[in-house]
Image: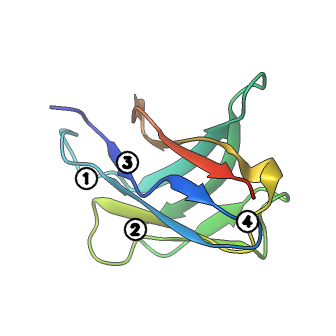
């Protein structure tokens, strides 16, 4: 069983929205912090946002004001609401909790 499973990626036009989900179904414990990272073609993986069980959040400057990370709906699930998407947001988005990584979900922003 995979420790983290992402879903919600797809193709969207610039200015559109997507909501990503990540469930920690296979982790041996409930993670306090769950985070999102992304990796664009030809680039290194970069931090996007994190959310804690107690409601704390943080964002990279490149997504602040456009993306919202949340842990609503359960301790083992993290969401990433992405609004006003730009072509530069095109990447594989990965969920991370503790030492565990998901396999990623592809987000493509293109007209």
Residue behind mark 4: 85
Taking 44 as reference, is 92 above or below it?
A: below
Image position of 82 (left or right of 66): left
- State the CA–CA distance, disc 2 to disc 1: 9 Å
User: Depth-wise, is mark 3 or mark 2 nearer the camera?
Assistant: 3
Locate the C terminus by quadrant.
Answer: bottom right
Residue behind mark 2: 53
CB under 8 Å between discs 1 and 4: no
Which residue is drawn at the image coordinates 74% and 51% (left, top)? 89
- Place of residue 100 in the rendered image (x, y in percent of width and height, measured from the top left): 38, 32
Which residue is drawn at the image coordinates 27% and 59% (left, top)? 76
Which residue is drawn at the image coordinates 52% and 51% (left, top)? 35
Locate the N terminus by quadrant.
Answer: top left
Mark earlier in primary sequence (2, 1): 1
Taking 57 as reference, is 27 above or below it?
A: above
Mark earlier in primary sequence (3, 2): 3
The residue carrying pointer 3 sits among few (fewer than 14), some (14 to 19) or many (20 or more) residues within 10 Å by Cα, namely many
Taking 95 as reference, is 54 above or below it?
A: below
- State the CA–CA distance, disc 1 to disc 4: 30 Å
Label 3 sits on a secondary structure element that is strand
The residue carrying pointer 1 sits among few (fewer than 14), some (14 to 19) or many (20 or more) residues within 10 Å by Cα, namely some
- State the CA–CA distance, disc 3 to disc 2: 18 Å
Mark earlier in primary sequence (1, 4): 1
Residue behind mark 1: 30
Residue behind mark 3: 6
Q: In the figure, residue 67 lies in which quadrant?
A: bottom right
Which residue is drawn at the image coordinates 51% and 53% (left, top)? 10
- Place of residue 50 in the rendered image (x, y in percent of width and height, measured from the top left): 57, 57
């Amino acid at each position: 069983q995979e420790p983290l499973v992402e879903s919600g990626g797809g193709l969207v036009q610039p200015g559109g929205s997507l909501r990503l989900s990540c469930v920690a179904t296979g982790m041996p414990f409930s993670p306090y912090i769950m985070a999102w990272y992304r990796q664009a073609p030809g680039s290194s993986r970069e931090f996007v946002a994190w959310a804690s069980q107690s409601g704390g959040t943080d964002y990279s400057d490149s997504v602040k004001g456009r993306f919202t990370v949340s842990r609503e709906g359960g301790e083992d699930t993290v969401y990433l609401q992405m609004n006003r998407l730009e072509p530069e947001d095109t990447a594989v988005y990965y969920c991370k909790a503790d030492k565990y990584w998901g396999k990623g979900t592809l987000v493509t922003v293109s007209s």
